[in-house]
Image: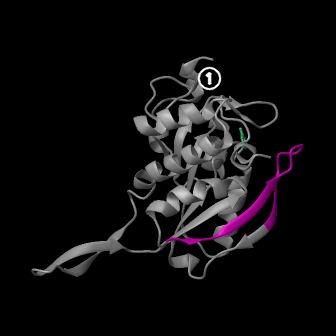
Amino acid sequence: MKYESVHTAKSSQAPAGIDASAWPTDRYERRMLHVSEHPLIHSELTRLRERSCPGPEFRQRVRRIASLMVASVTARLPTQVVPCETPLELTSGVSLQRPIVLAPILRAGIGFLDGFLDLLPDARVAHIGLARNESTLVPEPYYFKAPAGLENSEVIVLDPMLATGGSAIEAIRTLQDAGAHHVSLAVLVASPEGVEAMEAALPHVPVFAAALDRCLNEKGYILPGLGDAGDRLFGT
Ligand code: URA
C-alpha cells in the first residue's frame, strides 16, 4: 500500500492515478471542498481503515472522527448578536442564526450521526433512505422523513462514504425539494469521482471530508477506502 494514495486538500500532488493536469492543486480552493488535516482525525481514520479493526472499535472511531469534524463542518455557520446576562453584568454574545438539522443517509449515515449529536445535542434529525443498487450503482429512494422548518435550518447531510456521489446528490436534491436552502455534506472518505459529481450537480454545496482518497474501483468502492462502511458498522 502506498501512503501517498491518501491526499488532503493542500496536497501538492494530484492523487495517484489521476491526471495531474486535470487535477490542479488550486482546484480544491475553488471547490466547496474541505478536507481535514487534523492529526487526530487521520490517526483515527488510519486505524479504522485496517481490515483487522473489529466492529465495536470501528463504530467508536467513526463516532470520534464525526465529533472531531464538527468544529470544521460548523465553522462558517452564520451567527447573530444576542444579549447575555452574566451573574455580574449584561453583555452580548452570539447564537446560531439557524437551527441545525442532521440528515444521515440510511444506513451507514446512522453510524456517523452519534458523533455529531454528541456535540450538537439540540440538532434535529432528518432520515433519508437510499439504497445503492449494487449492479447499476444508482441510488434508489425508499424513505424520507424530515423535521418542519427545513427552509430556515442548516442541514448537514451525513454519509461516511462519498463514492460515485449518486446517493449524496439524490439526498441533497430530496432535501432541497422539501425546502432546504442551506445544505452541506459531511463524509469520512471522499473519492475524486464523488467530488467531481458533486461539483457538477451541486456546485454550491460545501463538502467536508476527513480524507480524500485515490479513486473508485470497478465496483464503485473507494480505494484505498475502508470497505463497506455499513457492513463494518453494523456487522452485516
Ligand atoms: N460505500 C462504502 O461503504 N464503501 C465504499 O468504498 C463505497 C461506497
Colouring style: one colour
Q: Residues within 10 Å of mark 1 (few under 14, many from 20)?
A: few
Q: Tell me where residue 77 appears, x and y as whole percent.
A: 40, 63
Q: Is 53 or 142 nearer to us in this picture?
A: 53
Q: Is 134 or 13 nearer to us in this picture?
A: 134
Residue of label 1 = 19
Residue bounds of the magenta highlight? 123-142
The relative height of residue 90 versus residue 113 in the rendered view (above or below) is below
Tell me which residue sits at (64%, 52%) in the image. 159
Q: Quick check: 183 left or right of 132?
A: left
The relative height of residue 217 versus residue 113 in the rendered view (above or below) is above
Magenta part mainly helix, strand or loop?
strand
Tell me which residue sits at (60%, 54%) in the image. 112
Q: Amino acid at mark 1?
A: Asp
The relative height of residue 141 versus residue 133 in the rendered view (above or below) is below
Tell me which residue sits at (69%, 47%) in the image. 233
